[in-house]
Amino acid sequence: MEITTLTVHELQEKLKNKELTSYEITKAYTDRIAEKEKDVQAFVTDLSENALNQAKEIDAKREKGEVTNELAGIPIGIKDIICTKGVRTTCSSRMLENFIAPYDATVMEKINGENLIDLGKLNMDEFAMGGSTEYSYFKKTRNPWNLNKVPGGSSGGSAAAVAANMVPWALGTDTGGSIRQPASFCGLVGLKPTYGLVSRYGVVAFASSLDQVGPMTKDVTDCAMLLNIIAGHDSKDSTSVDNGDKDYTKSLKADVKGLKIGVPKEYFGEGINPEVKEKLQEAMERYKKLGATVEECSLNIADYALATYYIIACAEASSNLGRFDGIRYGYRTENYTNLKELYRNSRSEGFGAEVKRRIILGTYVLSSGYYDAYYKKAQQVRTLVMQEFAKCFEKYDVLLTPTSPTVAFDIGSKSNNPLEMYLADICTVSVNIAGLPGISIPCGVDKEGMPIGMQLIGSRFSEETLIRTAYTFEQDLKFRENYQPEFKK
């Protein structure tokens, strides 16, 4: 039995039956990190030593009956944008290279409350701006299915670490597809929860009205289990919604009979890879055989979603990143003679090219004379996007689209062409604009053996329906039993 290939619910069962200890599980993962990290490059901060010490403590407490929860002692990986007390939280930027978080994000408090073991902080695009994890200050993460390809982004380190079996599950964040797209590229399940379901307190902000923390897992069961841990109201986050206590694992039922699935035709037009389209068609047929109704529908506003997203996201990034000025905390230049130079040089040296690009764009659309033409207009279109989705959900329970127009692309093939990189988000951004939940699950592979992701979108707080819809498909397709990463070079 290879411990690191097991899902979390399988590990949980073995802990419960005393077939494995937390130390044995954690040691298997730290050994795997030592073996595969040189190829995959998923970690910014490796906490293996701390993790093994924590595992020993949890085993001792379990023996004495001091730890009773069934997930205690299971390892996890954390995207390096989530504040972790006493641990470097860098956002993969030179600006925060040596920043030690003085407190835990709310999601980390919940993780620690379950006695999960943090294996380390995972690489990402700098400040979550990017779709390939090539914009990290520290390293370029590689896709375990093919080491010459990107793992997606910005949560590429989280996706690659789970796919490479270096962590059993991980937390990512999603501003415009940053959980779902890397999940698609790496053959995982990735859920972007409804805006407000998971607290953003302690998560370094990119675009505050779009960001959400979510699970990246090997299967839908693990996804439901991790959502149970992190979801819930938080008084420290003014956008947090009290949606009651729910057990999302109760939605793990293989039954879609009578479910109405809408397929927006705008997501299957120009630019969608033929092999991606083919696998999605097969998925629709599978759902029909399982008893669901599948119909083509229209989201007229979809064509405007990408432009709307980039205006709003860059405007909010420009505002949020203003705090990194070389004065309060973070990187400070040594090359200055006055205050103006200190600001300018600290930000010029501390931020990478993609972050600067978005700050400039965001500052432009918020500036006098352009605010009404761009930012205000984008917020008006955002309302129309929400209304358009609401109209669709009057008729359908779930919408089905590709997660990404293509499979994972070659490292370096798009990093010098920002527009092409932005177009890779075309299927995911509208979900964030409308604050809806979306889940990506694998629906097959292309001719080269690279995973293809299917996105399911639900109305606000319909995570239970999404989990049931995804679980039914997963149980029928059995993707994990048939396909595993090959680490091709």
Image (tube, rainbow, N blue to C red):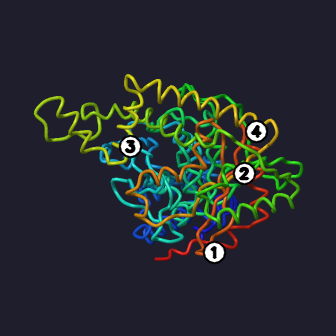
In the picture of the structure, the residue carrying the numbered disc 3 is 86
The Cα–Cα distance between marks 1 and 4, rounded to whole angstroms, is 46 Å
Callout 2 amino acid: Leu
Dot in front, 1 or 2: 2
Dot in front, 1 or 4: 4
In the picture of the structure, the residue carrying the numbered disc 4 is 392
Looking at the rendered structure, which numbered label has been put on residue 400? 2
In the picture of the structure, the residue carrying the numbered disc 1 is 1
**In the image as oriented, which residue stretches furthest toward the left?**
337
| Residue 104 in view (yes/no) | no
On the image, the x and y values in percent for residue 106 come to 53, 36
Q: Which of the marked residues, 1 or 2, is nearer the chain's N terminus?
A: 1
On the image, the x and y values in percent for residue 189 come to 64, 56
Query: For mark 2, does the 10 Å Cα neighbourhood hold few (<14), some (14 to 19), or many (20 or more) residues?
Result: many
Displayed quadrant of residue 476: bottom right
SS category of the residue bearing label 2? strand
Pointer 1 and pointer 4: residues touching (CB < 8 Å)?
A: no
The Cα–Cα distance between marks 3 and 1, rounded to whole angstroms, is 35 Å
